Amino acid sequence: MQNRISSFPPIISESSKVLILGSVPGVKSLEMQEYYAHPQNHFWKIIFRLFNEEITTDYSQKMKILDRNRIAVWDVIDTCERDGSLDTRIRNEEHNDIVKLLKDFPNIEAIFCNGQKSFKNLTKIVGKDFDLPVFVMPSTSPLHTISLERKLEEWKKVLEI
């Protein structure tokens, strides 16, 4: 029997230009009720370095960093069944309404998918002919074993928006 888990609400504002989409929160994120809470996940390290921000563990400060740099964060999956944190264990998923979010926040100029699962699910939701640029980024997950430096090089595309 797998556990039914739910995503978090989006972090987004009227000034957001970039939407970063993950798949669904992992065990540590669910436990902490914070996006990308696993200490080995590279997401926050990448954000701090991309925008030359001071490193902090304070989640409210992290939210301010996202807002200041016009970054929105959400997941493509609203609810699903999954044991553990592996995307490959996700079953019976229901998607978030990405299309509605983009209509409600027309200031979004590009979508960055945090890993292949996010991209595959986004394609299921919106189809292949989509009017925003979509970038598939290397997953920030500790299970995606390329180095932080290599991930950071790819994620620099966010700065071009």
Image (cartoon, rainbow, N blue to C red):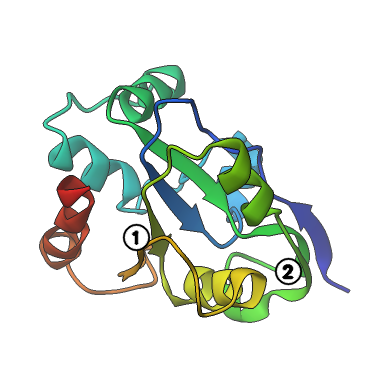
At mark 2, the secondary structure is strand
Say whether residue 114 is left or right of residue 34: left
Residue 121 horizontal/vertical position (percent): 60, 73
| Left or right of 145 on screen, residue 113 | right
- C-beta proximity under 8 Å, tags 1 and 2: no
Q: In which quarter of the image is residue 23?
A: bottom right
Residue at the right extreme? Answer: 1
42 vs 84, nearest the viewer: 42
Closest to the observer, 2 or 137: 137
Answer with left or right where residue 102 lies relative to residue 95: left
From the top left corner, tell me how far across and down residue 93 is, in percent.
77, 70
Please tell me which residue is depicted at 53% across the width and 33% down the height of the picture.
Answer: 11
Q: Residues within 10 Å of mark 1 (few under 14, many from 20)?
A: many
Distance, label 1 to label 2, CA atoms, is 19 Å
Q: Where is residue 127 in the image (x, y as percent from the top left)?
A: 59, 77
Instruction: Tell me the residue at 22%/28% (across/down).
Output: 55
The secondary element bearing badge 1 is classed as loop
Is 41 drawn above or below residue 49 in the view shown? below
Residue 145 image point, x, y percent: 28, 74
Give the total of numbered labels. Answer: 2
The three-letter amino acid code for the residue at tag 2 is: Arg
Query: What residue do we see at 69% from left, 74% from top?
Result: 90
Characterize the local packing of mark 2: few (<14), some (14-19) or many (20 or more) Cα atoms within 10 angstroms: many
Q: Quadrant of residue 108?
A: top left
Name the mark on residue 140. Answer: 1
x 17%, y 24%: residue: 54
> Which residue in the protein does label 2 denote?
82
Q: Three-letter amino acid code at disc 1? A: Thr
Q: Is residue 146 left or right of residue 96?
A: left
